[in-house]
Image (cartoon, coloured by chain):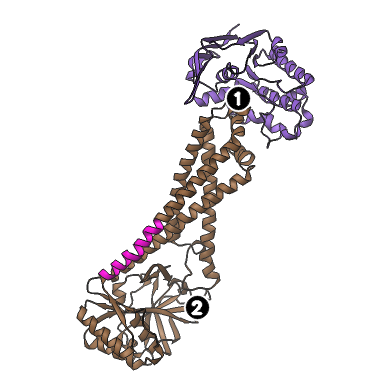
Amino acid sequence: MKIFKFFITRIFFRKILIVISVLLLFFLSDYIVFTTARSTVSTFQGYNEMKSINQKGNYIANLDPNNSMDLGNIQKEDTQYIYDHLKAHNLKYAIFTDGLIIDLPNNYDMSVSFAYLNEDYYKLNKQFEISQGNELVFDYSLDSDDTEIPVLIGKGLSETYPLGSEIIVNEPALQKQVTLKVRGILKSNIYHSNMYSLNSKQYYNFSIVIPVNEDFLYSSDLGLQLQSLFDIILLQTSEQEIESLGEVLQNKLDLKFNFYTQEDNFEYYKEYYFHSLKIIGVITAILIFILTCLTVWNSLAGIRIMIKEFTINLFVGLSYSKLRKIFYGYYGIVFFINLIILFIITAFSRYGNWTRKDASFSTFGLFGIIGMDWLSLCPVLLFDIMIGVIIVEIMIWRIKKVPISLGVLQ
Amino acid sequence: MTNIIELAIQEKVYKNKRARLSILNNFNLEVNTGEMIAVVGKSGVGKSTLLNILGLLDRNYNGSYKLFGADANKLSLSQSAKWRNQKIGFVLQESALINSLSIEDNIKLPLLYKSPGDSQRSTDFENIVSTIGIEHILKKKPLECSGGEKSRVVFARAIIMNPQLILCDEPTASLDGENKERIISLLFKMNQEFNTTIITVTHDQEVADRHKRIILLERRM
C-alpha cells in the first residue's frame, strides 16, 4: 500500500497533465458507452411495451402529417359521433391519453397530471402495476352527484393520499367536481413509453390514473375525446372496418388518419429505430475505438515521460509484478473517478427534475437515479475493466521491452 | 575468501533487423567477497552490459551466473527485484535521481521496497548523510543541487540498504577533481568498513588504478 501511495502521490499525480488527459479520454469513452447503453435499454423497454399493443388485428391510429390542422372547427358532437360509430359497429378500442395538469396539494409540491385509459387499454398495456391496493375497476357510474371514481395514484402522492383516501377535485376532463377514491398505488417509477419514439418515456410518480368507461368518455369534454382519438387503438378488427372508420373521421373531423398494423409498426421500428440503433452502435464503436487508441497512445506517452522514474524504482527493488499491480490500482482510481463523475452527472440530471418540479420526469431512487441508469453503468464498468487490462498489459509489455538498464538512464 | 560472483558468459548478442553484435564472448569472472574491481575498456565492448548482467537486470545471454551462491538465472523476477533492493547497490551517474522527489526521498527510495519481515542490515540514514556531507541539501530537489552533490546523493541511495555488492557505472564521469576524490574515498570506506564488494565500470584510468584489480574488456574480432 505504501508503494502504491508513493506512486500515486509522488509519481503519477506530479504529472498532472497526463493524469487529466487520461481522465478526460476515459471519461469521453465512458460517457459515450453510458449514453448508448441507456438509450438502448430505454428503447428496448419501449419496444417491449409496444409489443403488447402490436397484436394481430390491432390497428393504431396516427394523424396524417399532411393534415392542415384546424381543430377549432371540431365540435363535441363530431367526436361524439365517432364514438357512437365505434359503438354501433361493435368496434373494440383502447384509448390512453395524459397531460392534463391540476394543482393538488402534496408533500412534494408537484403539479399532478391526470392519465386517462379505458379498460381495453388497461388490459392491453400492463405498465400500470400497483404496489398496494387493488387493480382498477371501470364499473362506476357518473349518474349520481356523490359518485366516487376509483383511481390509481403515483407513489409520490401516496404519502398525502394513502390507500382508501378520497380526493375531491375539479376534474379537468369532466369539468366538474368529483370525488376520486384511491384504490391502488402504483409501483415507484412506473413509466409509459412514447409509441413512436420508443426511448422517450414519462413517469407516473405524480399522476392520477383515471379509468375511463363509456359514461366518463361520453361525459367528458371535447379535449379528452379528441385527444383520445389521436392515438386510438382499434382491437381485433379488419381492414374494411378501419377504412370505414377512416372515412368517418375524414368526413366528420376533416382529419386524415392512417392506421398501422402490427406488421407496419414493426417495419417502422425496424426501419427507423433498429436501423438508427445500428448506426448509433457503429458510430459509437468507431468513436470508442478511436478514443481507446488515443488513450493507449496517451498512456504510452506517459510511460515514455516517466520511464526514468520507473527505471530508477526498478533498480532499487520494484518488481514488474508490483508495477503491474500499481498500474491496475492507478487505472482503478481513474475509472472510479470517472464512474463517480458519471454518477454525479446522472444524479444532477435526475435530481434536476425534482428541483424543477417536473412531475413527469421526477423519479424515486438515490438522487432520482433509476434502475435503467444503474444498468447502464454496468457496461461502462465492463468497458473500463476491459480497456484497463488492455492498457496495463500494453504498458507492462512496453516497459519490459525497454529493459531496465543503465542505458535507459544515460 | 568465498566467491560471491561466478560468471561464465559464452556470448551476449544484440541484434536488430540489420545487424548482429556479439560481445562478452567467452567471458569468465570470479569475484571474492570484499574485492574492489575496476572494469575498463573502449566504448561498446560491453562494460555496461556486464553491469546489467551482474546486477540481475539482464539475463538474456548464453552462460551461467552464480551470485551469492545461487543460480541467478533461476531467480524469479520478483526475487531479482528483492535482491536488487537488499543485496546490490547501484552507484549510477548523477542524473539517476527522480527530480520530483526531495533529496531525502531519493535517498530513502530503496527503503520503500523493504518488507517488514526482511532481515536487513540497512544503515542509519543520519549517519550516511553526515558521513557523505549532504545534510544541508536534504530538503532540496535534485535540480537545485550541483553535479557533485547529486553524485553523493546517488551514492547515499546505493548504500542505504548496506548492500553486499556495489555496482558503479562511471560514478565520477562528470565530476571535478575534488568531488571525484570524495566519491572514490566513500567507495573505499564502504569496502574497508563493511567488506563490501565493489565493481566499478569506468573510462577514467586514474580511478581504475585505485582499485585492487582491473579487468580490461576488449572486443574479440
Residue A217 locus on image (x, y percent) = 33, 86
What is the three-letter code of the residue carrying label 2?
Answer: Ser
Looking at the rendering, which quadrant does residue B162 occupy?
top right
Chain represented in brown: A
Looking at the rendering, which quadrant does residue A92 occupy?
bottom left
User: Where A348 sits versus A334, above or below?
Assistant: below
The disc at residue A406 is: 1
Q: Is residue B203 left or right of residue A295?
A: right
Q: Which residues are magenta?
A: A263-281
What is the three-letter code of the residue carrying label 1?
Answer: Leu
The disc at residue A111 is: 2
Q: Is residue A77 left or right of residue A240?
A: right
Count all numbered tags in the image, as a single digit.
2
Residue B201 locus on image (x, y percent) = 64, 16
Sequence-first tag of 2 and 1: 2
User: Are callouts 2 and 1 both on one chain?
Assistant: yes
**Screen quadrant of the C terminus of chain A:** top right
Q: Secondary structure under badge 1?
A: helix
Give the mark toward the camera: 2 or 1: 1
Looking at the rendering, which quadrant does residue A205 occupy?
bottom left
Counting other residues with Cα less than 10 Å from the Cα at mark 2, is it few (<14), some (14-19), or many (20 or more)?
A: some
Chain represented in purple: B
- Is the stretch drawn in magenta largely helix, strand or loop? helix
Q: Nearer the viewer, residue B138 or A229?
A: A229
Residue A186 locus on image (x, y percent) = 39, 71
User: Where A42 sits versus A404, above or below?
Assistant: below
Residue closest to the far top: B1
Q: Secondary structure under badge 2?
A: loop
Residue A371 visible in image: no
Q: Nearer the viewer, residue A52 or A261?
A: A261
Q: Chain of mark 2?
A: A
Q: Is residue B124 left or right of residue A261?
A: right
